[in-house]
Image (cartoon, rainbow, N blue to C red):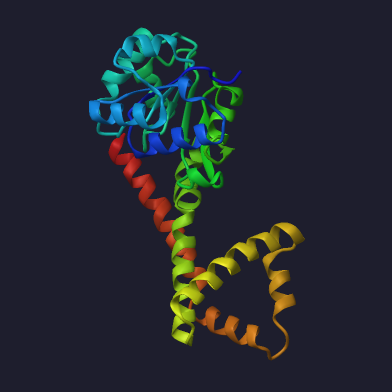
Amino acid sequence: MAAKKIHFIGGGQMAEAIIRANISKGINEAAQFSVADINEERITFLSETYGIEAAFSQEEALATADLIILAIRPQDDLAGVGEAISQYAGSGTAVLSVVAGVTIQTLGGYVGGQERPIIRVIPNTLTDTGLGYSGAALNVYARKEHVDDFLNGFGKVQYLEESLIDIFTGYGVAGPNYVYYFIESLADAGVLAGLPREQAWQVALENVAGAVAMLRHSGLHPRQLLDINNSPGGVGIHAFYELNNSDFAAGLQRSVKAAVKRTTELGQVRS
């Protein structure tokens, strides 16, 4: 069953983005949300901007919540927050954590993990678009029904084994960065070739959006579409030859591996 009362511990930028997206898409009403933060000005801002409840009584908010969202930093007082959850929240109340680098096992030790549903989420950064995948790992007591509507309120979700979280972070969640950089480089290439900046920018955006739509519409592999577009001795195959010489594919793959490696290192530092 979808959560009726959702309490955020931590009201930073990610919490705000998730709340904003869920309310704007009509997945949750503002009255379903409450938020607590050490910065009272932040609580006031979120309350006035989105109409959500300012949880000045943490104990009451925890006791009535169906879903508790940990949206604090790894270096914050996670032990103290966990103790409050263990003391005031119902034993079956689900806890969803977006705290980077903190495992489900560690979270269980903080929040009273005996039979408590715990969900670890790596949220996507495309919250306002309704696109992008978040990665979610569940403990043995958690079910998709606890969080599925909520997670789909700010994008899409892939459920995975926790052992894949670091890979998902470096590849999936960091994915828009690679695309942003490609689009910027493609627009620069158009300017270098002689197009005005605004025209090059619009062509780059339309080509990227259109290429994705074409892949979805046709169901073809990218290589098949490349073969269709690249006639013998033509413009496309000459451009593709130069791109191959640039080590583009291997460079992108090295970038993903470096991001995954750094994610793992940060998790080890925090554990």
Q: In this view, does 224 lie to the left or right of 209?
A: right
Q: Position of residue 198 (x, y in %)?
A: 46, 74
Q: Position of residue 107 (x, y in %)?
A: 38, 24
Closer to us: 87 or 102: 87
| Residue 39 seen in the current view | no
Which quadrant is the C terminus positioned in?
top left
Vertical comparison of 156 with 35: above or below: below
> Which residue is found at the position 51% from the left and 42% from the top?
164
| Vertical order, 245 against 83 (above or below) | below
Where's residue 235, x and y in %?
Answer: 64, 87
> Residue 98 falls in which quadrant of the image?
top left
Residue at (47%, 14%) from the top-left corner? Answer: 93
Q: In this view, does 223 lie above or below 243?
A: above
Task: Kindly tell me whether residue 215 is visible in this rendering.
Answer: yes
* Count of number-bearing discs: 0
Task: Identify the residue shown where x is 50% and y is 19%.
Answer: 117
Residue extending furthest bottom?
233
Q: Nearer the viewer, residue 144 or 205?
A: 205
Q: Where is residue 71 in the image (x, y as percent from the top left)?
A: 36, 31
Which of the image's four quarters has the N terminus?
A: top right
Using the rendered view, name the quadrant where residue 2 is placed.
top right
Say whether residue 88 is left or right of residue 164. left
